Amino acid sequence: MHSFGERIFRVLPRQEGSTLAAALREWLPGISWSQAKRLIAGRYVQVNGNLCLDVARRIKLQDVVKLTARPSVAPPGPRDVAVIHLDEHLVVVDKPSGMTTNRHPEEWNASQRRRQLQPTLDELLPRIISRMDVKRKKGPPPPVRAVHRLDRDTSGLIVFARTAEAERGLMAQFRKHTTTRKYLAIISGYLAPQTFRSRFVRDRGDGRRGSTPRDGEGKAAVTHIRPIERIGDYTLLECRLETGRTHQIRIHLAEAGHPVCCEKIYNRPLYGKTIEDTSGAPRLALAAVELGFIHPVTGEALHFEVPLPKDLTDFLYELRRRTRLPS
């Protein structure tokens, strides 16, 4: 705990390129270098909504830096990654929330220190696999190849290729939308069974991805939804992907006026007011619980399912408890 409370800082033009620690010293007059470093190491600082542990991170003009009143949850590590299936061609894992699938292009030149502080799933997996594979020859473990992605704060099933042959075969299935992908989401309000069909563009007009009404633009996005349980002002929802666009489920639900609980990006209509989230969700309430595809080498039909993770089952329990309380 610190004495500054919760603060949000915008990067000024003259601060662009400064380290995060140097910027904190400017925003919080009087603090020392060691205090700035302790705030960052203590998990009190977020950049663009994500926990940042790198005191030497260079900030950009568009960055939004948040100082939290309480420390964020420690980032997940190798022990939080569950390997569901492993063979010589591919690996299926249950990704924890808070871990990025792979580096975004703007982070390809990230320092080794930053990579070690917050490794991505594809960076961790080779070492995890090497510890499981006792027959593997010595030397650095070969990299895995991402063929699809889960959002950083979305947990659940994801497959990586271990060979070029598997990569080609899996990517072809994802392109043709022949895979099975089911998610569970907890949303505000209620939605009846339906199918969302729209075309996504990278910028709907305010820098966020979204659907466009203009014919011939964007890429087709199709999501099938079905309510499973209504809990007071919230609903546990099954979402099946027919296509797999970036943030597809989150965008479709938000555009319907029912964003996923703890949604921090798609939480307002175009040029509209932010939809306040009062759910108390511990993180983005979205999990990939089912994944099916044809093995790209053996031709075997593979199907995997995982339960809703504990943090979200606890959240559901709390919603049910609150619903039962007398008004």
Image (cartoon, rainbow, N blue to C red):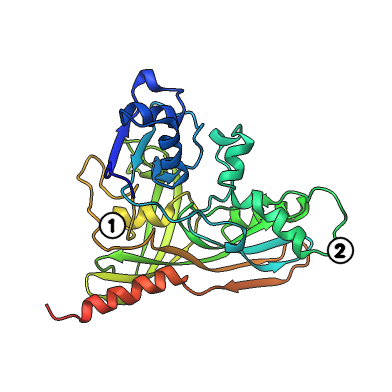
Q: Is residue 11 left or right of residue 145?
A: left
Tag shown at residue 285:
none
Estimate the spatial distance between the alpha carbons at disc 2 and disc 1, rounded to whole Å.
Answer: 51 Å
> Residue 285 or 28: which is nearer the viewer?
28
Give the answer, above or below, for where 326 lies relative to 206. below
Q: Which residue shows up at 73% across the image and 49% down it? A: 143
Q: Residues within 10 Å of mark 2 (few under 14, many from 20)?
A: few
Quarter of image, res 193: bottom left
Q: Which residue is mark 2?
A: 135
> Residue 40 or 101: which is nearer the viewer?
40
Q: Which residue is mark 1?
A: 256
Name the element at disc 2: loop
Q: Inspect the image, locate mark 1, and give the three-letter code of the amino acid beneath it.
A: Ala
The label nearer to you, 2 versus 1, is 2
Quarter of image, res 92: bottom right
Q: Inspect the image, locate mark 2, and give the three-letter code of the amino acid beneath it.
A: Lys
Q: Earlier in the sequence, mark 2 or mark 1?
A: 2
Q: Is residue 163 left or right of residue 240?
A: right
Q: Residues within 10 Å of mark 1 (few under 14, many from 20)?
A: few
